[in-house]
Image (cartoon, helix red, strand yellow):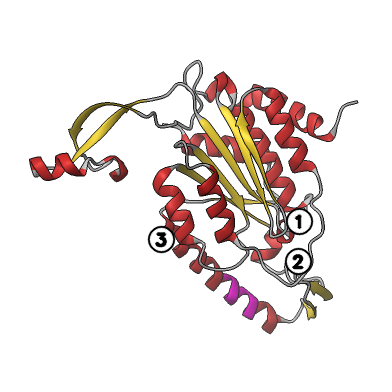
Amino acid sequence: MITASDRLLRRLEWKLGRRLDGRLQGAYRTVWHGTGLDFTDLRAYSAEDDVRHIDWNVTARLDEPHIRQYTEDREMTAWFVVDRSASMRFGGHDGKASVATGLAVGLARLVAQGGNRVGAILFDNRTRQVLPPRGGRDQILRIARELTRTPAAGSPGSTTDLSEMLRLAATTTSQRRSLIFVMSDFIGDPGWERPLAMLTHRHEVVVIRVVDPAELELPDLGLVLVEDAETGEQILVDTSDPLLRGRLAEQVGVREEALAAAMRTAGVRPHRVTTDQDLLAVLIDMVRRSGR
């Protein structure tokens, strides 16, 4: 029997095989590069270099910044840290969770080519699931199967602890420098920028923020009952009220600015993906933006 996860992977493989395979670099690498652990040489620091590779002992001795160079591993380990909280189930076009699932499976398929290993961390406030990294198509199917399962309904009243999700990712991936995809709507408790910065300090981190257009601009639907997916709080809202729409637009602007500032503090440039975008076009754009 063909499962939903198998159908999803087959559909993505057919589309990706036609549109993206030609963009992959080399016979075994993906467009995202891992960093090897074998030290090979030192050279003078230049402006485009990663400051994390500076050898401070040599820099102090020579009074000039120098960086360490490494031999790049042929095998890379990638992790998919996916927010599975209640707010991710909101949205049109099957919701934000569906978009995150499609992106995770598509990217895992790309990364796993040539023997690279992929793992996943699925998080909400009630359950945390870790799928250790492995290679092969069966591993991608396993990740797809877990992502297509509907999470158990949690008790309303608490927002997502994004800091805990990122700390779990840091603890789980501490043994080896990896490529980490963080997928979330970043709706939750504040203060997650520091754990994200710590994760970025050790790993190559790609942040994918999934949003629904209705979160950015309130549609005019008349009188509707709105429920907070995280806390369960309900309120009756007249979406046609211009004053209300104006206040909400201001609040959205403030929220977007605050989130952008937190991302800058963490040292990342997130990809923002909306639920009404074409999934394949998003993947192609990510490949184009991330290619070296």
- The three-letter amino acid code for the residue at tag 1 is Arg
Q: Which residue is mark 3?
A: 265
Picture disc at residue 89 = 1
- Quadrant into which the N terminus falls: top right
Q: Return the x and y of residue 141 as percentages of the image width and height.
A: 73, 30
Is the C-beta separation of discs 2 and 1 under 8 Å? yes
- Quadrant into which the C terminus falls: top left
Highlighted range, magenta = 247-252
Q: Residue at x 48, y 57 (%)?
A: 195
Q: Residue at x 47, y 18 (%)?
A: 26
Gap in angstroms between the C-alphas marked 2 and 1: 8 Å
- The three-letter amino acid code for the residue at tag 3 is Thr
- Label whose residue precedes the other's in the sequence (2 or 3): 2
Is residue 7 found left or right of 175 in the rendered image? Answer: right
Front residue of 154/267: it is 154
- The three-letter amino acid code for the residue at tag 2 is Ala
- Label whose residue precedes the other's in the sequence (3 or 1): 1
- Is disc 2 surrounded by few (<14), some (14 to 19) or many (20+) residues within 10 Å? some
Q: Which residue is mark 2?
A: 229
- Is disc 3 surrounded by few (<14), some (14 to 19) or many (20+) residues within 10 Å? few
Gap in angstroms between the C-alphas marked 3 and 1: 28 Å
